Image (cartoon, rainbow, N blue to C red):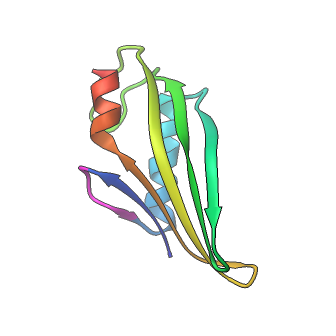
């Protein structure tokens, strides 16, 4: 099961909700960049810390477009069974994004 947990918003669970979320994000931030800061791991878990960076070019998640740049810290926790991904969660704080874009 994969999910997105934007703190301050409802968790998004399942392929359809996740795809809609990323489609909306990529429409609002068409030049969105992903920057990996660090990767931590155990035998069956990988934790990635990084940034989503981009300039808003359309309304997103109730935030009107003002052409502002966003640098959003994100964490991704992925659990594996052998080579198979069995669980994944992306965490970010929607309020951090909103403060930069408003």
Q: Position of residue 41 (x, y in %)?
A: 64, 68
19 falls in the magenta region: no
Q: Position of residue 80 (x, y in %)?
A: 64, 79
Q: Position of residue 43 (x, y in %)?
A: 67, 79
What residue occupies the far top of the structure in this picture? 67
Give the quadrant of residue 35. Answer: top right
Work out whether residue 38 or residue 77 is closer to the camera in this orientation and state it. Answer: 38
Chief secondary structure of the magenta portion: loop
Q: Position of residue 61 (x, y in %)?
A: 32, 38
- Is 82 drawn above or below residue 12 in the view shown? below
Work out whether residue 50 or residue 98 is closer to the camera in this orientation and state it. Answer: 50
Give the quadrant of residue 42. Answer: bottom right
- Is 5 drawn above or below residue 14 in the view shown? above
Range drawn in magenta: 8-12
Give the residue drawn at x 34%, y 23%: 101
Give the residue drawn at x 36%, y 27%: 59
Give the residue drawn at x 47%, y 20%: 57
State which quarter of the image contains the C terminus. Answer: top left
Give the residue drawn at x 54%, y 30%: 53
Q: Is residue 44 left or right of residue 13?
A: right
């Amino acid at each position: 099961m994969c999910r997105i947990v934007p703190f301050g918003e409802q968790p998004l669970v399942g392929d359809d909700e996740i795809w809609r979320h990323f489609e909306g994000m990529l429409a609002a931030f068409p030049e969105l960049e992903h920057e990996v800061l660090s990767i931590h791991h155990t035998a069956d878990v990988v934790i990635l810390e990084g940034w989503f960076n981009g300039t808003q070019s359309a309304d997103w998640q109730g935030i009107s477009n003002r052409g502002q740049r966003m640098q959003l810290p994100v964490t991704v926790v992925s659990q594996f069974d052998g080579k198979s991904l069995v669980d994944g969660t992306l965490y970010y704080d929607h309020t951090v994004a909103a403060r930069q874009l408003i």
